[in-house]
Image: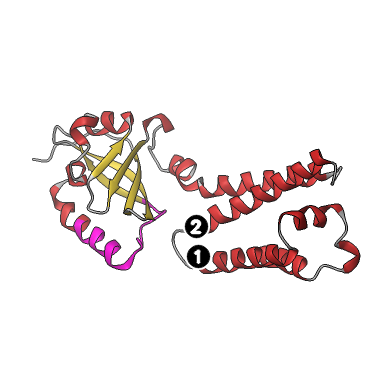
Amino acid sequence: MSLAIAASLAFVPDGQRATPGYASLAVVAPLSAWAVVWCALGMLCLTQAFMRSDRVAFAAATALLLSYGLIYLISTFTGDNPRGWVGGAVWLAFGGWIALIATWPEAVVLDRLPGSRRPASTAVIVADASGTIQSWNPQAEAMFGWDTDEAVGRSLTILMPPRFRTRHADGLARVLSSGRSELSGRIIPLVGLHRDGSEFAIGLTVNVWHSDDGVTYTGVIRPLGGPHVRPE
């Protein structure tokens, strides 16, 4: 779709360039520039279609669609495009739909896991590249038994049984070396470790974010039901 829009902007018939819709876009940037942006977005989507995490493409698409919607709305208020509000509503709604798809794995798919609880029980944990906890929400406190002041600054390994810790360390090392995680965006059934030593089934969705400060991990965790079991 992005490539089709790019083509429609790159090869606009002369008679249509003066129409309110195209004229409103041309006020902000030349139509050729809009075509390049849409083409770049299309190529980004094609590239990330083969990756497990396509959040960059979703974010870029959402930003571009919302920009279109705002431009059309502004052109309505300035009088340059009397019916621009129609296009504005369509583009804004489309951008909102794309944003919903981008958050769909955490917002919806986890609800389908057998035994998963209500969203109020969802723990959200943020950790740095070394696996050190940076922050977590009250649901994480209740789920794992550690207060926020106690958990922040500790390793994520306090949340998992010892038998999984070597695998966890290997996974962090792979992300640092390759720059991406094969588990990003997937729902992973795991075993959590409560502070009292009991184990319980969880569903984890982890995402990897890259910034100037390095790698950051965000984990969304829900209990899958069943009793806590204390290993013998």
The residue depicted at 79 percent of the width and 45 percent of the height is: 75
Q: Quadrant of the C terminus?
A: top left
Label number found at residue 188:
none
Q: Can residue 42 be seen in the rendering of this structure? A: yes
Q: Which residues make up the magenta segment?
A: 169-187
* Viewer-closest of 30 and 217: 30
Task: Give the labeled residue for mark 1.
Answer: 48
Asked if residue 145 can be seen in this view, the reply is: no
Q: Position of residue 227 (x, y in %)?
A: 25, 33
Q: Residue at x 30, y 62 (%)?
A: 175
Dot 1 lies on which element?
A: helix
The residue pinned by badge 2 equals: 56
Work out how far the residue at label 2 is from the one at label 1, CA to CA, in angstroms.
Answer: 8 Å
Please state if 73 lies on the left or on the right of 101 as rendered: right
Q: Is residue 209 magenta?
A: no
Q: Position of residue 195 (x, y in %)?
A: 16, 34
Label 2 Cα crowd, 10 Å radius (few <14 / some 14-19 / many 20+): some
Q: How many labels, in total?
A: 2
Quarter-of-image position of residue 125: top left
Which sits earlier in the primary sequence, circle 2 or circle 1?
1
Q: Please state which of residues 83 and 33 is positioned toward the viewer in this rendering.
A: 33
Secondary structure category for the residue under label 2 = helix
- The amino acid beneath tag 2 is Val
Image x and y of residue 129, in percent: 26, 54
Name the image quarter holding residue 219: top left
Q: Residue furthest left?
A: 232
Q: Is residue 185 rendered magenta in the image?
A: yes
Say if mark 2 contacts mark 1, CB within 8 Å.
yes
Q: Residues within 10 Å of mark 1 (few under 14, many from 20)?
A: some
